[in-house]
Amino acid sequence: MLDIITNTNESHKEEALKERIQWANSLRKVVTRKDAIDAETGALKQQFFKPTKIVFETSGKKWGDDQRQKLYEGLHIFGVGEWMKMKEHFHNELGEWTTLDLRVKASRMLGTQSLSRYPKGWKGTKEEVDLEYEKHKEIGEKTGCWKSGTLVEDDDGSVAKLLKEREMEGK
């Protein structure tokens, strides 16, 4: 007797699932691009969602120790935000990099997503930049806001709060 009840329940579930799939497929026929679905059934064509071209950058542009060292020097000489001056001054090492590239690399060196907490022109030696990185790492690990080697802001403002507390303590 239990087998009959179980089989009946399963067949109702299967029937309901088939109806939902039919409904989804009929809706897709109305709202989805024709090349993304099978015209008869409305089922998705998985091939449509696979990339047709995969492009790899093949230029010889690579960030290395020389570029990193020049960015440290640039932060010491020119300061945060002076990306164009750094690029011009260290043309051989940094010339092929955009100002956005330099900003992102500096952001990673300092260990923070937001460079806005530094006044434009904030200057620091390699040791000071490394100290900033360690400070941001410590705060990020305490708050759970350390993502991919970078301190990121959160909606609760816990990062800003901790930075303000540290500033009050003189750290």
Image (cartoon, grey):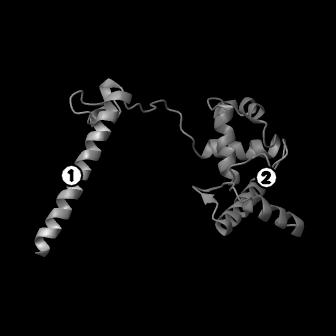
Spot occupied by residue 19 in the image (x, y as percentages of width and height): 25, 46
The residue pinned by badge 2 equals 125
Label 1: how many residues lie within 10 Å, few (<14), some (14-19) or many (20+)?
A: few
User: Would you call the spot at circle 2 few (<14 residues within 10 Å), some (14-19), or many (20 or more)?
Assistant: some
Q: Which residue is mark 1?
A: 15
Q: Position of residue 131 (x, y in %)?
A: 75, 61
Lower position in the chain sequence, tag 1 or tag 2 = 1
Quarter where residue 161 is shown: bottom right
Would you say 29 lies left or right of 93 here?
left
Q: Quadrant of residue 45?
A: top left
Residue 79 quadrant:
top right
170 is higher (above) or lower (below) than 36? below
Q: Name the residue at 82% across, 66% down.
A: 166
Closer to us: 22 or 133: 22
What residue is shown at x 74% (from left), y 35% (from top)?
Answer: 83
Q: Is residue 23 above or below residue 30?
A: below
Q: Residue at point 75% right, 31% down?
A: 84
Q: Which mark is residue 155?
A: none
Amino acid type, label 2: Thr
Screen quadrant of the N terminus: bottom left
Q: CA distance from mark 1 to mark 2?
A: 70 Å
Picture residue at 71% right of the left edge, 32% below the top = 87
Most distant residue in the bottom direction: 1
The C terminus, quarter of image: bottom right
**Relative to the observer, which residue lies in front, 105 or 23?**
23
Q: Is residue 90 above or below residue 163?
A: above
Tell me if 41 is positioned left or right of 120 in this view: left
The amino acid type of the residue labelled 1 equals Glu
Q: Are marks 1 and 2 in contact (CB under 8 Å)?
A: no
Give the structural element (helix, strand or loop) at label 2.
Answer: loop
